[in-house]
Amino acid sequence: MAQASGELTRYLELTPKSRAMWQEATEYLPGGDSRHSIFWEPYPIFVTEASGCHVTDADGVERLDFINTMTTLILGHAPLTVMQAVHEQLDRGVVYNAPNEHQIRLAKLLCQRIPSFDLVRFTNSGTEATLNTIRAARAFTGKNLFAKVEGGYHGTHDAVSISVRVDLQQAGDPDRPKPVAGSAGLADGVLDQVVIIPFNETEIARRILEENKDQLAAVIVEPVMGSVGMVPGSSEFLTMLREITQDNGIILIFDEVISFRVAPGGAQQYYGITPDMTSLGKVIGGGFAVGAFGGRQDIMELYDPTKGAKVSHAGTFNANPVTMLAGAVTLEQLTPEVYRDLAELTEELRQGIRDVCNELEVPVQATGLGSLFGIHFNDGPIHNYRDVARDNSALRNQVFLGMMNEGVLMASNLVGGLSTVISKDEVAAFLEAFKKVLERQR
Ligand SMILES: Cc1ncc(COP(=O)(O)O)c(C=O)c1O
């Protein structure tokens, strides 16, 4: 890694205006921004413009976008159909104190496509969506505990801010992971309400769930773990979760905020496993702030004001017409063929990553499903958080900055999601850049 600092030097040369903007931002915003997930050392770029698969930063550097706003923009930036529809809606008002017709259009599309959706409600974020799935499960079952996967990210509310990026020194035995606070300031007692299970470790997870089954209201899981680096669940693991929850009156929640990208009906359709409740976000808002939760009629009816509304749910901007329309227009373009093409192209990318690393003798695992991909510099198979924790993080950081220098944007943990405006040419450009960057690290 002789030239390890070369990437940083080049990054600093390429981004002086972003650096100045970030320095100004830090005077008003802690850390210079409002999202931890898009901070990287030494500072992030400031984007001034984006179109299709390109983003341009404050210094005029154009990059290929392979992350698409944490996998949100499946049609790329500013797709014409969505933009035209939104412009027309803006002339008719942005948000009303009454329901709007676009909400029905999007709700219908979701209920038709997603196996677990009898009914759906909208929110402004995935965080609010997972909060509601867990709240609904508690209200429905009258129980309190819930289980989550070690390393799983489900947003920023207290209940799920546990065992996300865990320091393995504190995480306990792999056979019995301990809940670890993921933030300061969580309410007293939240750690006692969570049971942690390891992803894709079917027998260990089954034993832990068995031990707690009488107290568990819910199990929440991402069928493809985004936060850990696009790691797909095994059918065996997800089937075990479905069976044990069904047998014990526990609500199975799929958090498909990211994995909804995998198939028209989400990863649940891909795996053929139907949960009781599902949370959504990202793609379904067509680029606007969104979340949704839905599921079984008997659970969702807890939200029905004509039936007493046992669970409270409001939000000034919930289901606003702009987001609903953008989401509906986006989903209408996502035919089964689009998903198939995206999956094929992404597999080409994953295989290309493996081939480059093979040639350069760099241990790698390229993970993902459908249009989602993750790169792990790791010589062992990747099943869960503890496997990913062994990735070569020094190389990962260099490759991230190197790819930025070569004009390719990913998440700083080297994950991404393709958009429909990425073609074989952009995949080839990605692989060429990836090879150059890895060669520089020798
Ligand atoms: C799986 C998952 N759940 C929930 C969330 C939270 O969504 P939001 O950022 O819209 O609050 C995210 C965000 O990245 C996510 O990846």
Image (tube, rainbow, N blue to C red):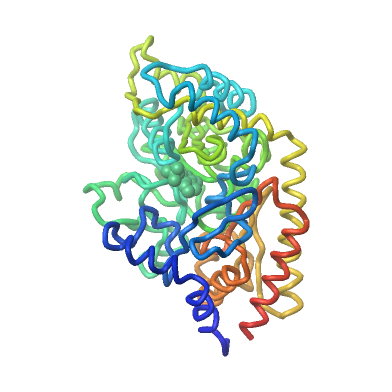
Task: State the image coordinates of residue 214 (x, y, percent, origin top left).
Answer: 39, 36
Res 256 visible: no
Task: State the image coordinates of residue 122 (x, y, percent, origin top left).
Answer: 45, 28
Task: State the image coordinates of residue 55 (x, y, percent, origin top left).
Answer: 57, 56
In the image, what residue occupies the spot 65% across and 59% down? Answer: 367
Up-down relation of residue 361 to residue 429 (above or below): below
Residue positioned most to the left: 188
Task: State the image coordinates of residue 166 (x, y, percent, origin top left).
Answer: 40, 62
Quadrant in the rendering for residue 111: top right
Viewport quadrant of the N terminus: bottom right
Viewport quadrant of the C terminus: bottom right
Apparent side of residue 330 relative to residue 279 in the rendered image (left or right): right
Could you say which is closer to the camera, residue 19 or residue 218?
19
Could you say which is closer to the camera, residue 341 or residue 139?
341
Could you say which is closer to the camera, residue 438 or residue 120?
438
Apparent side of residue 252 relative to residue 342 in the rendered image (left or right): left
In the image, what residue occupies the spot 50% across and 81% down? Answer: 9
Residue positioned most to the top: 306
Across the whole image, how many numbered discs are drawn on residues?
Answer: 0
In the image, what residue occupies the spot 47% across and 42% down? Answer: 220
Up-down relation of residue 99 to residue 62 (above or below): above
